[in-house]
Amino acid sequence: MDDAPKKGFASFNIIEATISDFRNALDSGLLTSVELLILHLQRIGAYDLAGPQLNAFTTFNPSMFDEARSSDARRASGEKPRLLEGIPYTIKDGYKYLGMNVAAGSPAFENLMSSDDAFVAAKLREAGAIMIGKTNMPPMAAGGMQRGLYGRAESPYNQEYLTAAFSSGSSNGAATSTAASFAAFGLGSETVSSGRSPGSNNGLVTYTPSRGLISCRGLWPLYVTCDVVVPYARCIRDMCHILDVLTIPDPVEKGDFWREQSFVNLPKTSFDWAGLKPCSLKGKRIGVPRMYVGGESKKPIVVSESVIKLWERARIDLESLGAEVILTDFPLVENYEDDSISLEPNNVKGAPSDWNKLERGLIIAKAWDRFLRENGHPGLHEIDGNKLFPKPPGYLPDTFFEIKNAIDYAGLPKLSESSGSLYDIQGMSDALQSLEAQRKLDFEDWLDDRNLDFVVFPANGDVGKANLESNFESARHALQNGVKYSNGNRAIRHLGVPTVSVCMGILEEIGMPVNLTFAGKAYTDDKLMEYAFAFEEKTKWRRAPGLDSVEFEVKGGKMTVEENEGKIVGTGNPDVFVNGSRQEVSTEGNRFEIPILQKLPVPVGRVVQQKNMVLVLGSREDNHLDAEIRFK
């Protein structure tokens, strides 16, 4: 028998590969799930741990190869493959995943272990997907590109620029990992613009759902009225495959705020994601808020000439598809941000006058305390609040921080001890009903009055620079409206507006992508996806970042692997790779030993040292590769 591994393994290119590409390769026997995992891990080693150190990952799934072998065994037995059988993905650090910690980027929770899977993680596991690892985020998702327990992710397109907006881009690791082809797709989340912003800076299809469509159970909350699950994909067809799994109804309401609350009735809605196709835009009337394309606005908004140039091309694309594009005002955002009325960062008619304070204080404390208790922890009162979101003294970006948005982290544990549940907080009923009423009045009724089908706008007005923590001008630019969040700011999420964003091109001067956001009435999510699909099919503006393929050859000898006194040893003649590069090993007879490895350079701000990824590759009886992974 030829002991060399099958050649399909080396011929398959994972860069920008689609879920259909992965399915076809796995179903045909071209490669196995274990081999597909190896290809992605080699790329992660070369670009996330070594090389440019993109630092997208916080921790890696210790069971990933066991999960991949189980998937391969299922295929080999003749069982019908599940929807995402053997396909690798990543998940934000704020989601629970059984067997791994759920630190949410915070030093306070470095050792907090997940008691079970978040709902979305459980559904993906049931669908056969393989979770590679958890991805980077600022502490508690309360920001964007601030460095947490694991530092922050960097841009795979241009490391001189941020991979997400500084003030709201907490899914930075999930987006970087997907854009860099470290996995087939990623799961982020959004509270303000933490899903849309990283999606735009990485040119990814980004979906923020209507309330209750994807269960948030098992996701660390921030502002419970805003939080949503946000999947990332490199094309809309992939997004539909993912949503086929994620939108399965969760029978458990407890732990998912909007489905559990009793003050507002949410519609029971389902969509045929598998059958979704591009929708003709002929005759559609599309509103474009002029303030996001260089027009007048009530508050200053940065819109760079480069973004306007991309928008003008996108406008032509939309018109060539038969749409009528109409410049408009945007009361959804303008009224919400009119602080002359409420003297608060947001203006929600009918909400209690102290609602902003409650959402940034008591409601967070109650939500975090409940998450901890449901995870088997005694509660937030036992946590040192100063460890929740520490920053270095004199942190330059805070020069431009809005005090109205401040959270008193040190005081949250004490607040959590007050009597009553999250739903007993005075004014909760009025606030939730007011949020729903304001979306209807300022957006849905406005769409009807203007005879508009939906709105589109550039996802951001410019991209912040990566050196903003040490450069005053970079900090000033990155903290301006139009740059510090995605356009639409908090109003989009707080008022429950669904969006789909797709790439509208690359900024020529800096090589960074920018998305076009499609927004419409609540629970028209499938129509928005169809409209965005039509634009994507027409334009195909997404480009992969300039990270070359990781080329490597394997002999595929038989092997065993173990650890002995801290050293990696074993038998046979395997191929060994450390962070994507071949590693020579010491051999004696039929035994090998991997020499002691130098420590990796520590990414700026990372507290938990990342270890070298050691892949030991050998062959199985069927001549496909097997692997063992160690972190040293």
Image: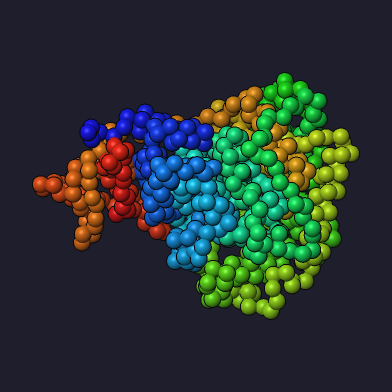
For residue 612, say whether it is visible.
no
In the picture shown, does residue 498 fall above or below 224? Answer: above
Colour scheme employed for the rendering of this structure: rainbow
Q: Front-most of 306 and 615?
A: 615
Give the residue displayed 31% in from the left and 52% down from the top: 630
Judge left or right: residue 562 versus residue 314: left
Give the residue displayed 72% in from the left and 20% down from the top: 320
Seen as rendered, the residue at the extreme right is 449
For residue 426, say whether it is visible.
yes
In the picture shown, does residue 322 fall above or below 19? Answer: above
Judge left or right: residue 486 versus residue 68: right
Residue 257, image x and y in percent? Answer: 68, 61
Q: Front-most of 101 and 84?
A: 84
Residue 239 position by quadrant: top right
Give the residue displayed 55% in from the left and 36% down from the top: 234
Seen as rendered, the residue at the extreme front is 78
Q: Quarter holding the N terminus?
A: top left
Residue 283, image x and y in percent? Answer: 81, 25
Residue 109, image x and y in percent? Answer: 49, 66
- The total of numbered circles placed on residues is 0
Seen as rendered, the residue at the extreme left is 589
Q: Quarter holding the C terminus?
A: bottom left
Give the residue displayed 61% in from the left and 76% down from the top: 414
Residue 104, image x and y in percent? Answer: 52, 59
